[in-house]
Image (cartoon, rainbow, N blue to C red):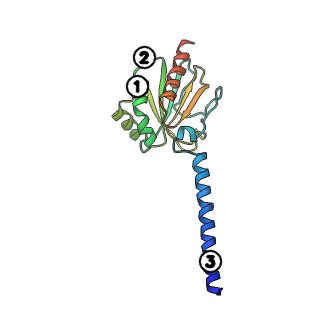
Amino acid sequence: MSIGRIIQTTANIATIAATVVLIAVVATEYRAHPRNPERRTPSAYQPGEAIETIDGLNVGNGKAAVLIVLRSGCQFCTESLPFYKTLTLHRVGTFDAIALAPEPKGIADRYLKDAGVEVDRTIEITSTQLTRVRATPTLIVLDSSGRVVKSWVGHLNQAGEDEVVRTLRSLARS
């Protein structure tokens, strides 16, 4: 066997081995983090926790609140807008709906208005605020004392949407 043939065979084996390793890494990563962000990203906050202080965010005033963290360029946010519209239109004052957006307030307001989502106020946040929110959209339900009841990350399926509604209804009864 010639030296050239040995080098070519070794290079082929190394290429095949590198390809197999790359495929294994990608497959493992895909299984650990599927496309649906609802399963991929853990909830931002745990029940009973307080969220960070943000200028303009007055919670714990005796009324429950739902914080909707979203941004206009987010595909999952746009897919979630019909649910947010339904959620905010039928609340009849039982909870405050507050949008938190990591973009200029005017852009977020226009984005929500164009989709028919009615919030009590929109607050522009920076990357140093709500540091535990790692993805948009994120919903955080707070009780009347301002403590987290539950949070959800990503575009919710029907079961997730139903859970949000049940959580808010249980707060309205208590």
Q: How far apart are marks 3 and 2 (CA)?
A: 73 Å
Q: Distance between the residues labelled 1 and 2?
A: 12 Å
- Using the image, determine if residue 28 lies above or below residue 141: below
Is residue 129 visible to us here? Answer: no
Amino acid under disc 3: Thr
Name the residue tied to disc 1: 86
Q: Residue at x 62, y 33 (%)?
A: 45
Q: Residue 9 occupies which quadrant of the picture?
A: bottom right
Q: Which residue is drawn at 42% across and 17% down?
A: 92
Please state which of residues 172 and 122 is positioned toward the viewer in this rendering.
172
- Using the image, determine if residue 3 lies above or below residue 58: below
Mark nearer the viewer, 3 or 2: 3
Q: What element carries label 3?
A: helix
Q: Earlier in the sequence, mark 3 or mark 2?
A: 3
Residue 29 image offset from top left, x and y in percent:
60, 51
Amino acid under disc 1: Thr
- Using the image, determine if residue 37 lies above or below residue 51: below
Q: Residue 4 occupies which quadrant of the picture?
A: bottom right
| Residue neighbourhood size for the residue with mark 1, other residues' Cα within 10 Å, grouped as few (<14), some (14–19), many (≥20) | few
Amino acid under disc 2: Val
- Using the image, determine if residue 6 lies above or below residue 19: below
